Amino acid sequence: MSSFGDKMLLAFLGDAFVTDFLTNQVGLTAIFNAAYDLTDLQLQALALASVDRKTFQSPTFESIRITGTYEKIIPTSERSQIDRSMKRFGRLVWAEVRLDISLATKVQNLAMPIDSVRTSNLVEDLGGVPDLATLRTKLLARYAPSVVDAMFKTLRITTIADFEQRMNLLVQLFFKPAPVFDPADPANARTFPVSVCVKFQPDLNISDALQAAKLCRAVMEREIDSSPPPDGADIKTPFVVVTMYPSSVLKDDAIPGMTAGQIQTSVQALFAAESMVASFVAGA
């Protein structure tokens, strides 16, 4: 490994360095957004709860999976389904440092509970429909054209009688407002686990670094079990890969026509687009 990699590997032994790396160099918001997509929640506060596990030079072997069929016709016709998995036979990926952390959050629940349900006759609710043209016009005043077209096509509506028989029940759901956010409510406190996998990149080889990061994440996602997501959130990835560069690679025209600042911003944006993080370490 390069002197940069060796230096960083030893630096991660220190708890203070790890905390600063997560909270200041990378940022907890960047880590959270790379790992989770909130569906019914809105993030209000975020903090590092704990670093639960820290490992160095963590290997993950890819399993080789074989699927298909085996067929023979002599002396009797037989067909067999093959589904075989060979552990530790595939590619090997490394995470120079793996940090299993817990993020403490305060979240607002945006889900609106159902208050009441009302059912009625749709034709009557539309004010009467003497013909299909009037029916379509009145439906288009309420619903998008794609919805109305799908309604007619799926239910094969060609007459008013068809509509009254197949689509005449209007069900309306009325919702209560989402609860007001209370930071003191224990129900709004959630803990989100994240595995941060760090890879060291001593030079400004963006393509190789991105490929290595994506391969590492892809293999780990397939081979390592992860916890189910908390309610109200979807997991983008259980493994947030952070590629660390020394800040010394940031020089004007290191990429022709770009300033050092433009290079840093562009590289970070590229990795963020892939739900990853690029970090440039000062003084390295």
Image (spheres, helix red, strand yellow):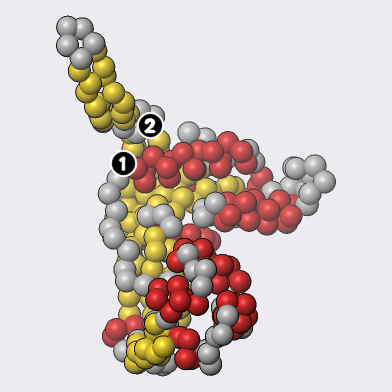
Q: Picture quarter containing residue 149?
A: bottom right
The residue shown at (57%, 56%) is 272
**Foreground of the two, 55 or 271:** 271
Q: Report the Cα–Cα distance between label 2 and label 1.
A: 11 Å
Tell whether 193 sits left or right of 127.
left
Q: Is residue 89 visible to us here? A: no
Residue 122, can we see it? yes
Kind of residue sitting beneath label 2: Leu
Q: Is residue 132 above or below residue 128?
A: above
Q: Which residue is mark 2?
A: 92
Label 2 close to label 1 by CB (< 8 Å): no
Q: Residue at x 39, y 90 (%)?
A: 120
Mark closest to the chain's N terminus, 2 or 1: 2
Provide residue 65's location: percent of width, then percent of height. 31, 30
Residue 224 percent across, percent down from the top left = 30, 45
Between 95 and 202, the one lying in front of the other is: 95
Secondary structure, mark 2, is strand
Image spot of residue 247 (x, y percent): 63, 50
For image coordinates 34% across by 42% down, the residue present is 222
Report the mark closest to the observer, 2 or 1: 1
Disc 2 crowd rating (10 Å Cα; few below 14, some 14-19, many 20+) is some
In the foreground, 218 or 93: 218
Q: Secondary structure at mark 1?
A: helix
Residue with the mark numbered 1: 223
